[in-house]
Image: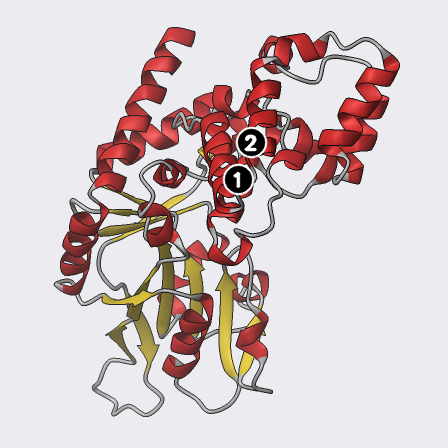
Amino acid sequence: MQKDLQFLKTRANFIRFSYIEEMEKYLLAFESRLSSKNIKVRWMSEETELVDFICKSLPKNNYNKVCFDIPKISDSFFEKKNFIKKISIDSFENNNDTAENLVIQANFGVIENGSIVFINKLSKNCFNNLEKIFVILNINDLVVRQCDLELLLYIQKEIDTSLICSDIKIISSPPSRIISKKFQLSNEDNYSSEKIEIFLLLYDNDITQMLGDNVLRETLYCINCGKCKEVCPVYQQTKEFSPIELIKYHCKEENKKSLKLFENTTLCGNCNEVCPVQINFTQLIIYQKQKFAKRNNNHEKNIDLFKIFSKRHKMNKVNSKFRRYFFIKKYFGKNKKLTNYFLNNKEDFFNITKKITQQ
Ligand code: SF4
């Protein structure tokens, strides 16, 4: 079973690699497939652009009823008073309220057949009651073939049963909605149908910037399974950065000057073990640290990192109370939560992979 899982992980890594390495070509193919099916594709680079486009496309000057099925709703949507009336998914789904527009994040796009995939989305039953649907899709969340998607979902489930995909909705052309006619002549039908307008917003979200770096582009293999967060001892204490978030944070231009890398990792390697697409976090963190040291001519810290990394086994045997105390203060002092955790933890703090996999 373990062997099978390893094979599937290698396959998943290959699936992501094939897409990411030729992302531009595949995105253009995806765009042309969707456009031929009357789904309007727009390219968005930043959040402000995305919000601006959605607001400008809303039909009314006031009280546009919008339902949001996205992880985080930007405050910028509500800057103009009374322009958007937010409708909760629950009340929309239960027919307690109506919405004309939906903003939803898609989980995947499938290039070979130009379809958009929604997994475990609460608004799944409401599509036919809308006028406009704005679908946000990160440009790295695409797969080349439908069978690739099946494999990715399968291994997510194998790794963590809570990620079982209980509901999947795939659309490849605009659905229709039924409209009841207010004024009809006696012989006419009471209802007619109309195509729903779908905008697919291909969202860059700093992805092309990561793509430009031959090493950091591995970050884009991520399929957001959340597993690295679960096994990260630092995240469990600080709730600040999951391993993948930590790397992505330092990829952003505005964060390149603030180095939060070392105080937010123990380089334990748990994330390397569990990642279904085999992202090598330790290597990426060291790479980012090297880049930072180079930019700032700070070679001393860089050497420290290698020293510590190569001596992880030895560091676990730092039994002397004082040595351990000064070590923790020196390297994790900037992160109070983590410092307290290590100071109170009497056990090994490097290479705890073994412990986690034994659980
Ligand atoms: S383990 Fe982390 S990096 Fe790997 S796919 Fe899951 S969320 Fe992404």
Badges 1 and 2: C-beta atoms under 8 Å apart?
yes
Examine the rendering and report whether any part of residue 36 can be seen.
yes
| Residue 22 picture quarter | top left
* 114 w.r.t. 159: above or below: below
* 17 w.r.t. 133: above or below: above
* Residue at which label 2 appears: 302
Percent across and percent down for residue 81 are 60, 87
The amino acid type of the residue labelled 2 equals Asn
Examine the rendering and report whether any part of residue 244 can be seen.
no
The residue at the point 36 percent across, 52 percent down is 209
| Residue 88 picture quarter | bottom right
- Counting other residues with Cα less than 10 Å from the Cα at mark 2, is it few (<14), some (14-19), or many (20 or more)? some
The residue at the point 37 percent across, 47 percent down is 210
Q: Which type of secondary structure does the marked residue at label 2 adopt? A: helix
Q: Which mark is residue 183?
A: none
The residue at the point 36 percent across, 73 percent down is 132
Q: Which mark is residue 293?
A: 1
The amino acid type of the residue labelled 1 equals Ala
